[in-house]
Image (cartoon, rainbow, N blue to C red):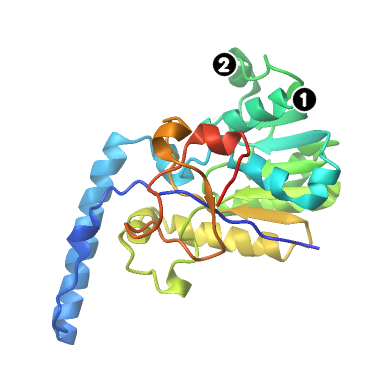
Amino acid sequence: MSNGCFIRSALPHAVRPDDFRLSLTRPSRDNQQVLHRRRLKKLAVDARRVEAQLDRRDLLLLSTTAASLSALSIDARLAAAAPSTVFVAGAAGKTGRQVVEYLSSQGIAVRAGVRDVDKARSAGLDQRGKVTLVNGDVTAGPDALAQAIGSADAVICATGYSGRGTINLVDAAKQRGVSKFVLMSSLLTNGKAIGQGLNPTFLLLNIFGGVLDKKHEAENYLRASGLNWTIIRPGGLSMDPPSQVGNLIIRGEDTLFGLPSDPGRAISRQLVAESRPVG
């Protein structure tokens, strides 16, 4: 049995939506091509500017903090039998670290998958609760990852945008027979199929090696895996408290696109980490 959960949050807009207003009169085919080239050129310029200002890993991760905890808490079957041990891939990242910290605060044992155990230990990742640091590079292949997962009941993937890495982790989870797989993906991964191919946010993010396309391929692989899965498609999260940002909103698949018309513009990391979804 499988299920799907999509948690909405707002994307950081590096490109103003006003830059992409279309003429009220329909342009000729030649003019459409010229406009499209101009938009792509502007996106490339804006993308380079954003990349210079932001950490590239943060941009591609579309950091979701501990959104995966909401996925675990709202799954009724897991609520009845919460996992005793969870493997977190990407545990040393900004998202993964908060997942580890929240799981630990709930008394759940964590196998924290990191690429550099010594570095993670020096950063204090294993100083709270029952946290075991393990080598968990998702590019290492399914067999190595299966060993890293060990006896964990559930897997949370909070890594970057490597489609192959996610596929490796899914295969490893199947080897270990885990009860739950939570994938932290991204808003607009299915943008092309739902008429959002010219969405400014989709174009900006996908310009980096087709990152959203790769994420979508990984989602489809997980869907077909036979695992009990939850996919979270958030955008960028805010470090501000819920009182300043607003409540978490959960919507169905392919219903929010990071546009100004979408309800809310951001979601607090704290609120998502504490698993208090409303709406």
What secondary structure is found at the residue carrying circle 1?
loop
Question: Could you tell me which residue is drawn at 49 percent across and 61 percent down?
Answer: 189
Q: Is residue 270 visible?
A: yes
Residue 192 in the image: above or below residue 19? below
Identify residue for label 1: 107
Q: Mark 1 or mark 2, which is nearer the start of the sequence?
A: 1
What secondary structure is found at the residue carrying circle 2?
loop
What count of labels does the image hold? Answer: 2
Q: Looking at this view, is 114 or 228 the one in front?
A: 228
Q: Quadrant of residue 53?
A: top left
Question: Could you tell me which residue is drawn at 21 percent across and 51 percent down?
Answer: 45
Question: Could you tell me which residue is drawn at 72 percent across and 66 percent down?
Answer: 224
- Looking at the image, residue 22 sits to the left or right of residue 99; the answer is left
Q: In the rendering, at what x and y percent does residue 186 appear?
A: 50, 53
- Looking at the image, residue 37 sits to the left or right of residue 143; the answer is left
Question: Could you tell me which residue is drawn at 68 percent across and 54 percent down?
Answer: 230
Q: In the rendering, at what x and y percent does residue 227 appear?
A: 78, 57
Q: In the rendering, at what x and y percent does residue 91 appear?
A: 62, 31
- Looking at the image, residue 18 sits to the left or right of residue 169; the answer is left
Identify residue for label 2: 123
Q: Are marks 2 and 1 in contact (CB under 8 Å)?
A: no
Residue 122 in the image: above or below residue 45? above
**Amino acid on which disc 2 is placed:** Ala
